[in-house]
Amino acid sequence: MTPHRVRGSVLIVAALAALASRAPAQSPERPLLVLSMGAGYVTGGSIWRLDRQYALVFPPVTSGEVDSVALGRLFRPGFEAGLGVTLFRSPHIGLSAEISFLGISTESRCSPLGPFAADSRNVNERACVDIQGKLIRTSAAAFQAGATWRPAAEARVQPYLRAVGGLALLGGSFVETGGVVAVPPASGDTARASFVSQVFLADQDRRELTWVATLALGVTMEAGPGTQLRFEVRDIMTNVSSVTGPGDHLSSPPFAQVGSRTVHLLALTVALDLVLERQRTRRY
């Protein structure tokens, strides 16, 4: 065989191999619909800290007698669960939408800035103890849409980048801070004690709606016919209410000075995908 024929044979084989490798690839006539169901771990940092908040002694022993405490709020480790859908009309770019629930509970902080004032019932002191480390049931339900990019659409292990954004419904208050203490009656009968809520900071206009955006980096792995596993790292950005100044301790309740703060939540999720492929039938 001459060198020219060898070269021609090599080119033909290479061309056939290229065609064979591209044959299973997705085309505009074969769009992919990926349905996802996943859950994972989510965590965040500090939300706000107030260096000094005054609180009237309960009940006031002398006019103007107050205690002073430092207050704060931070995120506790929580969970994320959601459903998503991505439509790939081309091999690399897809349109994505998802609904997710963020169980982003928070934890309150309280520490005295000196000895508590004389109070036979120690209401402020015991309220501060109750606040310290207290679990606050806060959450967010997010509705987002955006796009997904995957550079290796034909591989069994496919890395991808996703960016989505939308709105979130907030549950619970990220501002209100108070403790519950048992106060016995004047007779001293502890069996008939009443429970008193001592609010150090109140939330005048609790925020219920905010924006949310998510940047995700992940990889999918083929698990079986029409199914795949998804492992993802997510940076969830949202905006929540934040205390910017003390409340008026002479008012009841003492409404806090409130602003807003953009927070970052780190999430690690695992999902199961159902891959649906639509093929157009040819008419003869």
Image (cartoon, rainbow, N blue to C red):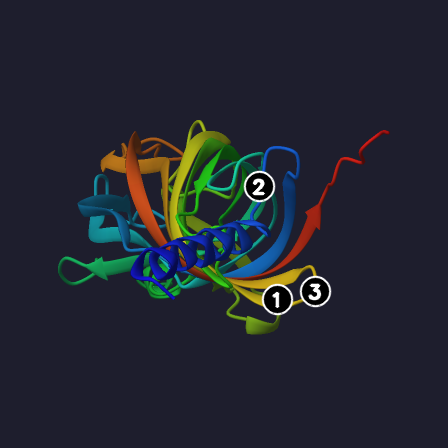
61 to the left or right of 190: left
Rendered location of residue 257, percent (x, y): 28, 30
Point out the image quarter for the N terminus: bottom left
Residue at image coords 42%, 35%: 212
In terms of depth relative to the viewer, which is nearer, 150 or 123?
Answer: 150
Residue matched to label 1: 192
Looking at the rendered structure, the secondary structure element under dot 2 is strand
Q: Nearer the viewer, mark 3 or mark 2?
A: 3
Residue matched to label 2: 98
Which mark is on residue 18? none
Q: Residues within 10 Å of mark 3 (few under 14, many from 20)?
A: few
Give the mark nearest the N terminus, 3 or 1: 1
Rendered location of residue 133, percent (x, y): 36, 65
Give the mark nearest the N terminus, 2 or 1: 2
Q: Nearer the viewer, mark 3 or mark 1?
A: 3
Which three-letter amino acid code belongs to the residue tagged 3?
Pro
Rendered location of residue 46, percent (x, y): 26, 53
